[in-house]
């Protein structure tokens, strides 16, 4: 199977930079599987799990909290708003994010559009919490 360059970057750190055979990303419009020679694409990310199959055959999982993916035939770069290895994330970290979003929603000082985005983000975090707890 052909491999390609993959990088996962958050503002805090570079989480991964290596050759991989496949990456599954939580794109806003649904999960996407990226492989070598993928058509050029740029997409936004929703909170979710990124699954990476390395060229060495190892599978790694990372949790992202939004961002962008830049996909080219020769590589893929995920620029995450925030990201951590899945095994470093616990339920309390997600619950803190859920509480922060609920607090923003309760402020009632948002336009309808912003309120809709906050509610969507809250829904995505809740789904992510269910995935992380089940894992």
Image: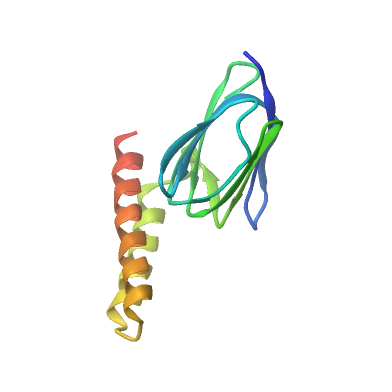
Place residue 105 in its image quadrant: bottom left
Task: Please report the residue visible at 58 percent of the width from the left and 26 percent of the height from the top.
Answer: 35
The colour style of the image is: rainbow
| Relative to 48, residue 101 above or below | below
Relative side of 14 to 113, left or right: right
Please name whichever residue, 83 or 91, is drawn nearer the observer in this view of the structure.
83
The C terminus is located in which quarter? top left
- Residue at the farthest front position: 39
Can the viewer see residue 6 in this picture? no
Place residue 5 in its image quadrant: top right
- How many tags in the picture? 0
Can the viewer see residue 98 in this picture? yes
Relative side of 33 to 4, left or right: left
Q: Position of residue 59 (x, y in %)?
A: 53, 24
Task: Please report the residue visible at 46 percent of the width from the left and 45 percent of the height from the top.
Answer: 27
Task: Please report the residue visible at 69 percent of the width from the left and 27 percent of the height from the top.
Answer: 4
| Relative to 107, residue 59 above or below | above
- Residue at the farthest bottom position: 109
| Relative to 7, residue 79 above or below | below
The N terminus is located in which quarter? top right
Q: Position of residue 65 (x, y in %)?
A: 47, 53
Please name whichever residue, 115 or 48, is drawn nearer the observer in this view of the structure.
115
Task: Please report the residue visible at 38 percent of the width from the left and 62 percent of the height from the top.
Answer: 96
Q: Position of residue 10 (x, y in %)?
A: 62, 53
């Amino acid at each position: 199977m052909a491999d390609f360059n993959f990088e996962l970057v958050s503002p805090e750190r570079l989480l991964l930079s290596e050759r991989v055979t496949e990456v599954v990303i939580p794109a806003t419009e649904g999960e996407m599987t990226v492989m070598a020679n993928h058509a050029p694409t740029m997409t936004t990310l929703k909170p979710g799990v990124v699954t990476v199959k390395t060229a060495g055959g190892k599978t790694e999982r990372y949790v992202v909290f939004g961002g962008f993916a830049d996909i080219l035939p020769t590589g893929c770069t995920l620029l995450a708003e925030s990201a951590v290895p899945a095994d470093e994330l616990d339920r309390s970290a997600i619950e803190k994010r859920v509480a922060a979003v609920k607090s923003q929603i309760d402020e009632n000082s948002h336009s309808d559009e912003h309120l809709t985005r906050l509610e969507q983000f809250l829904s995505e975090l809740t789904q992510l919490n269910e995935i992380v707890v089940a894992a």
